[in-house]
Image: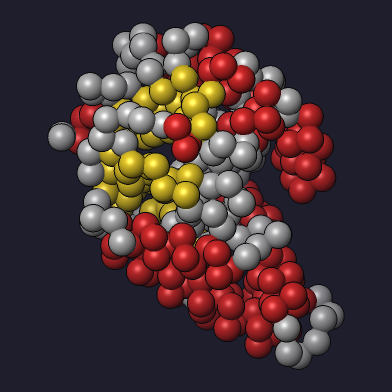
Amino acid sequence: MTEDHCALVEIKQRIPGFDRFIGSWIYQGEINFVVDVGPANSVNNLIQALLHMNMARVDYVLLTHIHIDHAGGLGQFLQHFPTARVVCHDKTVRHLVDPSRLWKGSRMVLGEIAEAFGSPKAVKGELCIPHTQADIKGLVVIESPGHAPHHLSFSYAGNLFAGEAGGNYYSFQDMDYLRPATPPRCFLNVFLRSVDKLMALDDQHMRYAHFGDAPNSHQMLKRFRAQILRWKEIVQKEMSTGSYNLVARCMDRLLEQDPDLKAFEFMDPDTQNRERFFMANSVRGYIEFLQNEG
């Protein structure tokens, strides 16, 4: 396979600081598929990009999970590509058919960001292929819960489309930035088992949902696993000193002590604000896990 078969399309957002954050991986070959479609309010940007690429046929949408920044635009997308079928976790089909509960939860967690992403539209159930029934030549579907309870990763033709099971990865000025995505309710041991499951696959090209790629999945997953445990140690230490301003204190310590966050200081202020928002959510996930574990 050549690199030209696989491309990351940025799905532009109107939110300050959200450049190079949401994208969709596009594969053109024996089968044409799209991995995630982004939010409802920006899905037309993806549709126009595919038309510009002369991709008139989409066979499958591979859905890593149903968070609205990954699946919110699915209803509109399928109207433009009516022959496409959606491979999704079997437990999520009902939330795609009736997204009202998903939308309510998204607004509670994301607030104004959810409103900017837009409300997801209903998807016809007959267009969905539960992951347990997906039989697509060459496609390996891996259950990888952690970031979301019903998260999937996909391996195809030397590409590992890991969604957020391998964290969030960016490249700034030749520097790497890697961050866990562990929002509440977080089950850290489940997350680690998913990382181990992905590491057990052949080494391949790592394709991140947020936002980019790296040539060696084994190397990146090993690095990410170490980061997950590093965050646990740092957050646990801060918790032992009291609860006052705990989330902010944890974030300060992480930015000081985690070398994989070093590129944060080179981001523009809007991007830093975005990262602080999602980092705080991840820290809350750790705190909740450690409180329940204790």
Furthest residue to the left?
A: 1
Q: Is residue 233 visible?
A: yes
Furthest residue to the front?
A: 133
Q: Is residue 95 above or below residue 263?
A: above
On the picture, is 31 further left or further right than 102? left
Q: How is the image coloured?
A: secondary structure
* Front one among 213 and 183: 183
Which residue appears at 73% of the width and 90% of the height? 240
Q: Is residue 45 visible?
A: no
On the picture, is 209 further left or further right than 29? right
Q: Residue 269 in the image: state x and y as whole percent.
A: 61, 54
Quadrant location of residue 231? Answer: bottom right
Which residue appears at 74% of the width and 45% of the height? 110
* Front one among 5 and 152: 152
Quadrant location of residue 67? Answer: top right
Which residue appears at 76% of the width and 90% of the height? 241
Q: Residue 167 in the image: state x and y as whole percent.
A: 48, 57
Q: Is residue 84 above or below residue 245?
A: above
On the picture, is 155 further left or further right than 233? left
Q: From the image, which quarter does the N terminus lie in?
A: top left
Which residue appears at 47% of the width and 72% of the height? 227
On the picture, is 43 further left or further right than 99? left
Q: From the image, which quarter does the C terminus lie in?
A: bottom right
Q: Residue 224 in the image: state x and y as whole percent.
A: 42, 66
